[in-house]
Image: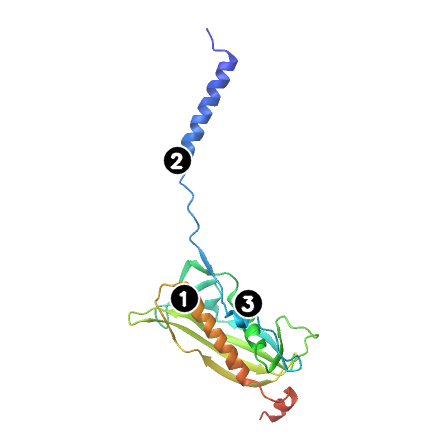
Amino acid sequence: MRPTLPFLSLAALALLGLLSFSACKLLPEAKPDPTRYYTLSLPAAIEASVPANAKALRLGLRQVELSPYLKKGLLVVRTSDTEVRYDDYERWAEPLDIAILRMLQTCLQADPRIGKVSVAPLSAEDERDFDIIVRVRRADGLRQASGSSVRFVAIVELHTTGAGGELLGQKAFTAPEITWDGRDFNALSQALSRSVQLLAGEIASMLPATGAKTAAAATP
């Protein structure tokens, strides 16, 4: 006697269910993503600050330029002056140049001598007394057998405003070395945050007490 159609349908369904169950058992279980993301951060008092004097100096942060090795979106660790290492699981939550630009804007606007800080892209409507360009040469951890630390080095340029802005001054900034355990990337991001905060203070110290035209005239 040949099996009826309903019997064949039930058998096919049972076989399909068995195959599906077996396939589920063979597939590897999904693992949580180990990637961690970090941001630069400032003390709450600075984050919440507002310009104290609207009539004070107006600045334009024209550009934060990173050395090419810092543009991968990963936190960088050096093992020597010539060797760098990247960990795909330790990443910046936003482009590092944008993060530094944002932090500098916040820190500079907290200075009572500065009334407004505009950031790139700058427009003709952004009235400014001076423009700033920052070139970041190093922003990484240094892991060595003798001890680990955090290094941050940048070049700051002070310009007059406009497309053909004249260079008024240039200064190299090296943040004080901060001890690091060589493993804690959250501590690394915090140390770099502190370095950017100190960089903002260095930029503020470069600003002339006079207006842009007077400063330009006094430049040899």
Seen at 52% across and 69% down, the residue is 44
Seen at 57% across and 82% down, the residue is 158
Seen at 42% across and 26% down, the residue is 18
State the image coordinates of residue 40 (x, y, percent, origin top left): 49, 67
Q: Left or right of 132: which side holds 193?
A: left
CA separation in Å, label 1 and label 2: 41 Å
Q: Left or right of 212: which side holds 22?
A: left
Q: How is the image coloured?
A: rainbow
What's the mark number on residue 90? none
State the image coordinates of residue 96 (x, y, percent, origin top left): 51, 66
Q: Where is the C terminus found, in terms of image quarters? A: bottom right
Picture quadrant where residue 214 is located: bottom right
Mark 3 or mark 2: whose residue is earlier in sequence:
2
Toward the viewer: 154 or 44?
44
Secondary element at image label 2: helix
Other-residue count near label 3 (Cα within 10 Å), few / some / many at <14 / 14–19 / ≥20? some
Secondary element at image label 3: helix
| CB contact under 8 Å: marks 3 and 2 | no
| Residue at the spot of label 2 | 26
CA separation in Å, label 1 and label 3: 20 Å
Other-residue count near label 1 (Cα within 10 Å), few / some / many at <14 / 14–19 / ≥20? some
Look at label 1 and name its amino acid. Ala
| Residue at the spot of label 3 | 98
Look at label 3 and name its amino acid. Ile
| Residue at the spot of label 1 | 187
Other-residue count near label 2 (Cα within 10 Å), few / some / many at <14 / 14–19 / ≥20? few
Mark 1 or mark 2: whose residue is earlier in sequence:
2
